[in-house]
Image (cartoon, rainbow, N blue to C red):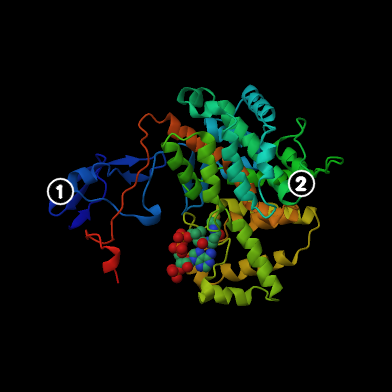
């Protein structure tokens, strides 16, 4: 089969020449001018499919939530620039914006906050679910399992009519409870008594309270720490069709409930190439430190591809010049470390790695720059978040983005179950060999 594609025409179509036959496909142009070729009829017309492993060239949906221009380093939620939101918004307000599409007015924000507060307690029965995990359990395993378990306490999640009517309640419940589950997982994993949320505290304060207070003594909440964590949540709140969000949309396409879909998102986020990168950055820095290296030896190994090492926290599938979140968080990182008077040898190594990599041809030629995870791990360490909770912080932040994407799938009247095809490369038909005749 021979093919050629001519560039999009003014009338919104492209011409594809396949085996000498000219075919026309419509183009879709996004609100920022991105062009997609709609090949929805390709297989019916030609018998062929497209193949794009890892989906680097494939748009899986139309979405009005987040816009990214990886070349220009642009990230916008519902049209608002991430730097503007980082400077002026809060995580709760940003969550509302992502899910409902507009900045809330005072009444909407108050109602949303009231819903969050009203849903912060877990069903008491879930205490027994927590008991079942060994102390060695990774908090991401607990988080994913417990989000799914929470759905069993709300049977109306599974009925289609209720799923839509009760969406605002379920969305608020999930955003609120993911923070409670996360804090309880930490307390469980460290053998500490659970601390219940307090209605007088704001979202991020409450999380820090449940993590670090004792039943008989409240932790002192430092405003700079609360602000830094709230900012981390905002910066992670959505990121277009990444691995975990695509997972949530895929699961949602089968009409699975909100909690089940987002629990799958947690699993997808866990891996070191995605949300697990912030933990992997700190593990890498610790390893370099323990070996008495200042980063130079490690970087040489990365460049020589010895031991399949990567400079964790560098590179991005979409951002090829800079990650706008990394620029914001780097500034915050310097501020927090100065405010808390933190001096950390791992930070010195991180700075050295950054300095060398940004001037090294290996990284420059491959367009590898620090991503948000390079700095978020350092801030979280400085404010006392344990390393195995880093990816959990990412999951708390990403929850509104997953929920917004779930809602988009649910509201799409043309949505169909996600079902990619494949090119089969296995054996052709062969007959069954009886055991006695097998080599
Ligand atoms: C994010 C990431 C998965 C993107 O992967 P990708 O778009 O598929 O990029 P590729 O794997 O095709 O990489 C292209 C080249 O850069 C190299 N490369 C990519 N990231 C690298 C890194 N962090 N350190 C060293 N080399 C890296 C690859 O080895 C490849 O080199 P080659 O051309 O010699 O084969 C990848 O950059 C990575 O693993 N980074 C570290 C993990 C991380 O920080 N993840 C968080 C993302 S927010």
Is 122 in front, or is 303? 122
| Chain-order first, disc 2 or disc 1 | 1
Q: Quadrant of the N terminus?
A: bottom left
Identity of the residue drawn at 53% across and 58% down: 273
Residue 264 vs residue 7: left or right?
A: right
Is 23 in front, or is 254? 254
Residue 222 occupies which quadrant of the picture?
Answer: top right
Q: Is residue 119 above or below residue 339?
A: above
Residue 207 occupies which quadrant of the picture?
Answer: top right
Q: Quadrant of the C terminus?
A: bottom left
Does ligand 1 reach within 8 Å of label 2's beta carbon? no
Identity of the residue drawn at 75% across and 45% down: 211
Q: Is residue 164 above or below residue 55?
A: above
Identity of the residue drawn at 67% across and 33% down: 125
Does ligand 1 reach within 8 Å of label 1's beta carbon? no
Q: Position of residue 83 (x, y in %)?
A: 60, 45
Q: Position of residue 82 (x, y in %)?
A: 57, 44
Give the distance between the C-alpha atoms of the residues marked 2 and 1, in whole angstroms: 62 Å
* Outermost residue, left side: 20
For label 1, the residue is: 22
Residue 43 vs residue 353: left or right?
A: left
Q: Which mark is residue 224?
A: 2
Is 367 in front, or is 202? 202
Q: Is residue 48 above or below residue 26?
A: below
Q: Residues within 10 Å of mark 2 (few under 14, many from 20)?
A: some
Q: Secondary structure at mark 1?
A: strand
Q: Secondary structure at mark 2?
A: helix
Residue 386: tell me if it is visible: yes
Marks 2/1 in contact by CB < 8 Å: the verdict is no
Q: Position of residue 257 (x, y in %)?
A: 50, 34
């Amino acid at each position: 089969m021979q093919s050629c594609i001519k560039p999009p025409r003014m009338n919104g179509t492209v011409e594809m020449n396949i085996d000498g036959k000219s075919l026309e496909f419509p183009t879709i142009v996004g609100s920022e001018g991105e062009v997609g070729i709609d090949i929805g009829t390709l297989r019916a017309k030609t018998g062929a499919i497209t193949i794009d492993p890892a989906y680097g060239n494939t748009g899986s949906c139309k979405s009005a939530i987040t816009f990214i221009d990886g070349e220009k380093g642009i990230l916008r939620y519902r049209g608002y620039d991430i730097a503007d939101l980082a400077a002026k918004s809060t995580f709760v307000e940003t969550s509302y914006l992502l899910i409902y599409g507009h900045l809330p007015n005072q009444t909407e924000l108050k109602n949303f906050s009231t819903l969050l507060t009203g849903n912060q307690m877990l069903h008491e029965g879930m205490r027994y679910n927590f008991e079942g995990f060994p102390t060695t359990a990774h908090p991401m395993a607990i988080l994913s399992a417990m989000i799914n378990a929470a759905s069993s306490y709300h049977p109306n999640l599974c009925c289609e009519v209720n799923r839509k009517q009760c969406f605002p309640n379920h969305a608020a419940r999930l955003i609120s409870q993911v923070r409670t589950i996360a804090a309880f997982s930490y307390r469980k994993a460290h053998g500490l008594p659970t601390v219940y949320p307090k209605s007088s505290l704001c979202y991020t304060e409450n999380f820090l309270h449940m993590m670090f207070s004792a039943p008989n003594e409240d932790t002192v909440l430092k405003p700079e720490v609360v602000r830094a964590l709230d900012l981390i949540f905002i910066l992670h709140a959505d990121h277009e069709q990444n691995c975990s969000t695509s997972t949530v949309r895929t699961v949602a396409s089968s009409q699975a409930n909100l909690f089940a879909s987002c629990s799958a998102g947690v699993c997808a986020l866990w891996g070191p190439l995605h949300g697990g990168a912030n933990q992997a950055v700190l593990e890498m820095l610790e390893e370099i430190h323990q070996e008495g290296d200042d980063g130079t030896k490690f970087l040489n190994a990365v460049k020589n591809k010895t031991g399949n090492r990567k400079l964790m926290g560098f590179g991005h599938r979409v951002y090829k010049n800079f990650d706008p979140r990394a620029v914001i968080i780097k500034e915050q990182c310097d501020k927090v470390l100065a405010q808390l008077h933190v001096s950390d040898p791992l930070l010195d190594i991180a700075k050295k790695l950054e300095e060398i990599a940004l001037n090294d041809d290996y990284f420059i030629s491959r367009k590898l720059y620090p991503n948000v995870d390079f700095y978020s791990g350092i801030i979280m360490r400085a404010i006392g978040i344990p390393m195995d909770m880093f990816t959990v912080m990412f999951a708390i932040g990403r929850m509104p983005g997953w929920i917004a994407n779930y809602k988009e799938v649910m509201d799409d009247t043309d949505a169909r179950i996600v079902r990619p095809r494949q090119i089969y490369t296995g054996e052709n038909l062969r007959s069954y060999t009886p055991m006695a005749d097998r080599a």
